[in-house]
Image (cartoon, grey):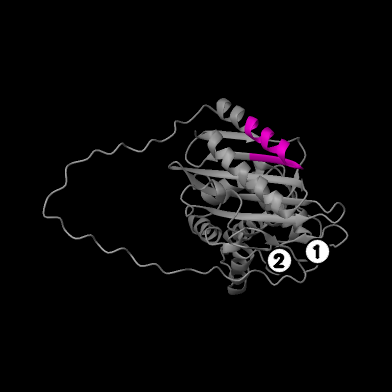
């Protein structure tokens, strides 16, 4: 897919080196995408030999869980942390964080304007497609399942365009978002789905549609399907809000990156679910005006960590 070169230079897929996390950028029309994630088998440690003498009893302190703050305290701490972070990096940055199973929430927004979604809109596209099938009493076709898999796991742009057409483009996305409660999100014109405009608050609402069974218009089967895909994104794309995940295995996410042709600056976004001190958090970080892809990723990851700490520390 060639995405309006006069409007943007890149929407889509880059491969991050696992060691130094330095992404290599390509024009999306020529990008074939990263290889599938690899796994390494490990051998379970052998059991220690039985001791003939019982060891002396020991006492272990119970792990401490940070106490939740009030929303006002969390927002104050988050604002302070993000202002400091924004002062160290170029561009705009907004972030929102919330407990999945609680009322605690904090948001920092740099101005009232919206952000380009870049590839995080692919979550919205898939949610819209699933809602469409639910209303029709149908299920995803085999082709749609294949396209959904590579769209989320590998951020494939051709698959995203195919499913964008399947939901009816901008009118289809905007119609589904009315059901989802996204009041400040507007689909991109034509096939420019990456230029969909959104806010951190709307992305948090979308994350609740995907991960929160309480009141979500999506069925549990649809939500489980989306969670499974977002939990298994290819290795090179496991950056962003996953930086706030303490054990490194409890996250589900989708990232977006786009270089604007007019300025050469980067939009870098990340949304998803993480585990932090025994709490499940939903985090959305949106940014633009980054001087490079790498610096934008660094900023987004630092913001995700700061958001989790501000909420629970």
Cα separation, mark 1 vs mark 2, equals: 9 Å
Residue 254 lies in quadrant: bottom right
Neighbourhood count class around disc 2 (C-alpha, 10 Å): few under 14, some 14–19, many 20 upward: many
**How far across and how far down the image is residue 194, in percent?**
75, 57
Looking at the rendered structure, the secondary structure element under dot 1 is loop
Q: Is residue 138 above or below residue 105?
A: below
Q: Are marks 1 and 2 in contact (CB under 8 Å)?
A: yes
Callout 2: SS: helix
Magenta range: 79-95
* Residue drawn 62% across the image and 39% down it: 96
The residue where tag 2 is placed is: 157
Residue nearer the viewer, 175 or 6 = 6
Instruction: Say if residue 105 shows up in the picture.
Output: yes
Q: Is residue 113 magenta?
A: no
What residue did someone put label 1 on? 3
Along the viewing direction, whichever of 127 and 270 lies nearer the viewer: 270
């Amino acid at each position: 897919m060639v995405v309006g070169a006069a409007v943007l230079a890149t929407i889509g897929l880059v491969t991050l080196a696992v060691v130094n996390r330095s992404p290599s950028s390509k024009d999306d029309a020529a990008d074939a995408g990263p290889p599938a994630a690899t796994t390494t088998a490990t051998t379970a440690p052998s059991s220690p030999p039985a001791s003939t003498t019982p060891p002396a009893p020991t006492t272990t302190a119970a792990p401490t869980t940070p106490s939740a703050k009030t929303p006002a305290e969390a927002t104050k701490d988050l604002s302070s942390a993000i202002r400091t972070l924004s002062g160290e990096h170029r561009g705009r940055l907004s972030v929102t964080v919330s407990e999945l199973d609680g009322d605690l929430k904090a948001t920092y927004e740099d101005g009232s304007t919206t952000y380009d979604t870049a590839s995080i809109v692919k979550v919205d596209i898939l949610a819209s497609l699933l809602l469409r099938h639910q209303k029709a009493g149908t299920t995803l076709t085999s082709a749609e399942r294949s396209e959904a898999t590579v769209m989320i796991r590998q951020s494939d742009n051709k698959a995203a365009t195919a499913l964008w057409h399947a939901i009816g483009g901008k009118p289809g996305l905007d119609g589904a978002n009315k059901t989802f409660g996204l009041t400040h999100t507007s689909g991109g014109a034509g096939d420019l789905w990456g230029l969909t405009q959104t806010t951190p608050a709307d992305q948090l609402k979308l994350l609740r549609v995907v991960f929160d069974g309480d009141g979500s218009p999506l069925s549990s089967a649809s939500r489980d399907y989306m969670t499974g895909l977002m939990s298994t994104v290819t290795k090179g794309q496991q950056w962003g809000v996953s930086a706030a995940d303490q054990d490194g295995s409890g996250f589900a996410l989708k990232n977006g990156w786009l270089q604007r042709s007019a300025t050469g600056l980067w939009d870098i976004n990340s949304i998803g679910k993480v585990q932090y001190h025994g709490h499940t958090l939903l985090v959305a970080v949106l940014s633009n005006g980054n001087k490079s892809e790498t610096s934008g990723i660094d900023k987004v990851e630092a913001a995700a960590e700061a958001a989790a700490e501000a909420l629970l520390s």
